[in-house]
Amino acid sequence: MNPVDAAEGTPVSVKIRERLLAARKRFNANDNISDFIEPGELELLLDEVEEKMKGVLSSLVIDTERDHNTDQTARRVAKLYVNEVFRGRYVSAPPITEFPNAEHLNELMIVGPITVRSACSHHLCPVIGQVWIGVLPNEHTNVIGLSKYARLAEWVMGRPQIQEEAVVQLADLIQLKTQPDGLAIVMEATHFCMGWRGVKDMDSKMINSVMRGSFLKDPNLRREFLSLIPKKG
């Protein structure tokens, strides 16, 4: 497919951006814009990114025509960004089946570690880490399968962003889906922008948390959750 509509001569990225602007919606790096992408446009966007990436490689003085190692690099990078690393921007949230809390469960539940992969929005370098989720349900809480927490985390993390905002986004989503009495999330990650550039420190990790409801109000519950998470090192 040609990334430019033959009839109108307008790149698909421009069309998507115009819809967002008309609706007065943000399209920051960590925003999901799937509602503004029409069927078939993701494939066109992939082609457009490939063409732009060819220009980047050319500006880096890399001979993609005669170098067998890089003749398909532009396409591979485009697929990496659109279909994998940044997929959480372009596709809707995964379907999650919710069940009523028929047994009135009200004990602390912890899911993790969930391995997550993202990219920092400053340098587009990998962010690889683990997430632990603590939920204190009540009789009105919606129950979702354990694997669904991982799917939601993967969707949220699949965008360029900073770790602090990613954890808040994940907390907001799980809060909306389950409506628990308490919600706690801890994330520990390695940021490759520290290992590849700047101080080039390969051992540093970032740990942050979000506490909601009972976890924020009850220090004993918070301590129980943190004590049950395997020691991070």
Image (cartoon, grey):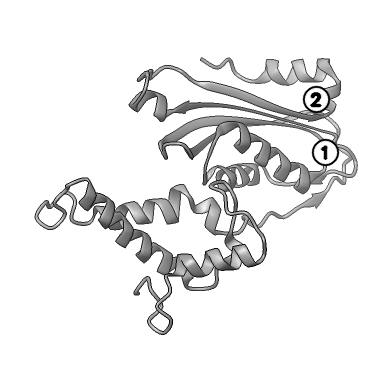
Mark 2 or mark 1: which comes first in sequence?
A: 1
The Cα atoms of the two marked residues, 2 and 1, are separated by 11 Å
Amino acid carrying label 1: it is Pro
Q: Which mark is residue 150?
A: none
Q: Residue at x 62, y 54 (%)?
A: 26
In percent of the image, x 26 and y 57: which residue is there? 54
Quick check: 186 above or below 4? above
**Which residue is at the far bottom?**
7
Tell me if mark 2 has few (under 14), some (14-19) or many (20+) residues whose alpha carbon lies within 10 angstroms of its own: many
Question: What label sits on residue 180 in the rendered view?
Answer: 1
Figure check: 231 above or below 75? above
Residue 98: x %, y % from top left: 76, 52
What residue is drawn where x is 13% and y is 58%? 65
141 vs 35: above or below: above
Can residue 204 be seen? yes
In the rendered image, residue 232, in percent from the top left (x then y), is placed at 55, 17
- Secondary structure, mark 2, is helix
- Residue 101 picture location, percent across and down: 85, 45
Along the line of sight, the residue nearer the viewer: 149 or 213: 213
Measuring from the top left, give residue 2's x and y in whole percent. 34, 74
Q: Which mark is residue 215?
A: 2
Left or right? Give the position of 40 relative to 174: left
